[in-house]
Every structure is written in structure tokens, then in C-alpha cells.
Image (tube, rainbow, N blue to C red):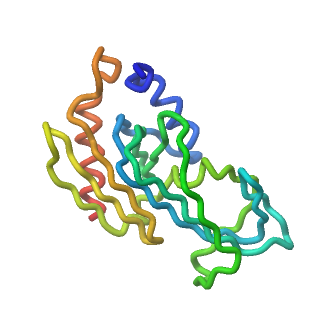
Amino acid sequence: MSEIFDETNMRQILGKYIPAGQTLLAGIHAVSNETMITGVYGKCVRTESRLIPNENGSLIALNKKKYSAYDVYLGITQDFLIIAECERNRYLYQFDDAPNVNTADIQEVSSDILLTDIGTCFSLKDIQSCMIKKGWMGSVKCFVTMKNGSYFKLMLPKLGGLGGGMPHHAEYREAIIARLSACS
């Protein structure tokens, strides 16, 4: 559990999801109390663990949900919000193989996508709303809703854990709150 509160570990995990040309500006440990990720993928086929590109594939709508609290790393780059789980978790996956959607919402699959990697990187421009309010013992509650209907109920703790493994937590937390507040 202590490796969760380690800035080096956090940077490595967030680094896997940072788009090319972007730099991690701030990252913290947070808690996701509820997650609902939606997406529509085209020209692909679904296996048990991934979406695979296929020119003759179909449209697949995905809802990825989790209704219990779990540890995440929350990071921001110049243009993206990154939410990565600290430890592997299980989600409820629901699929619709014949969705009725707007073609603008379809993401064409060009390479294999692990289901576990879906919903980790979001453009800050795609944030529809972000409600921020004070929580218990100095924490901050953050409800982020994306334009595609995905949402996250996050809790940003005041402290970055015991032992000093996240020395920049307070500074980075304020930077994340300021950036998300600007998206509202």
C-alpha cells in the first residue's frame, strides 16, 4: 500500500497514458468514488479483454462502470486529464453491438485497445462541467462530467499519505484544482 503514496511510482503509472508531445504538469493520489466511462468504437471486434481493429468490424458502444471507492492517480498535462488506477480493479462492462449514435462520437480503432486502458486520458476541452466543493478534513470533492456522458466522482485528499513519499502533493493538488476549475 505504501508504494501508492510514492511520487516516482505515480509518475511511472501516469506516464503510460500521457499522449505524445505532452508533459505531466501535476499529479496526485486521489480516490474515485464512482466512475462511469462511455465510448463508441468503430471498425473493430471485441474479445474478452480488448477491442481489435477490423475493417469489416462493427460499431461497439461501451459503458465501463465502478461504484465503489478505489485509489487513482490524477494528473494533468497541457491539454489532458489523466486518471489511472493505482492497482488493478474490476469494472462492470456493458456492451451494445448495435448502438444508435451520432457519427461524430465514433472513435475508429486503429490498434488494439485493452479494455482496462479505456477511460484513462481525456482532453481538457471535452470536460463539460466540473463541480468542486470542500470535503471532510480538508479534502476536496470533484465531480467531473465529460461531453460524451462519462463522469468521475473524485475525492482529492489534503495530504499525500504518510512517510513523505509525495512531497509535492499540496502544490500539485492546487494546480489540478485550479485547472479543473477553469474548465467549468
Closest to the observer, 100 or 25: 100
Q: Quadrant of the C terminus?
A: bottom left
Quadrant in the picture for residue 159: top left
Closest to the observer, 183 or 34: 34
132 vs 78, left or right, is: left
Above-or-below relation of 94 to 68: below
**Residue drawn at (33%, 23%) of the image:** 166
In the current view of this chain or complex, which residue is farthest to the top? 163
Q: Where in the figure is residue 121, as x and y percent of width and height?
A: 51, 52
**Residue drawn at (40%, 22%) of the image:** 6
Q: Quadrant of the N terminus?
A: top left
Q: Where in the figure is residue 136, as x and y percent of width and height?
A: 15, 42
Above-or-below relation of 111 to 138: below
Above-or-below relation of 52 to 21: below
In the current view of this chain or complex, which residue is farthest to the right? 56
**Residue drawn at (43%, 46%) of the image:** 77
Q: Where in the figure is residue 174, as x and y percent of width and height?
A: 23, 41
20 vs 43, left or right, is: left
Q: Where in the figure is residue 43, as x and y percent of width and height?
A: 77, 70
Closest to the observer, 111 or 71: 71
Above-or-below relation of 6 to 132: above
**Residue drawn at (46%, 53%) of the image:** 66
Please tell me how many numbered marks the rendered image carries: 0
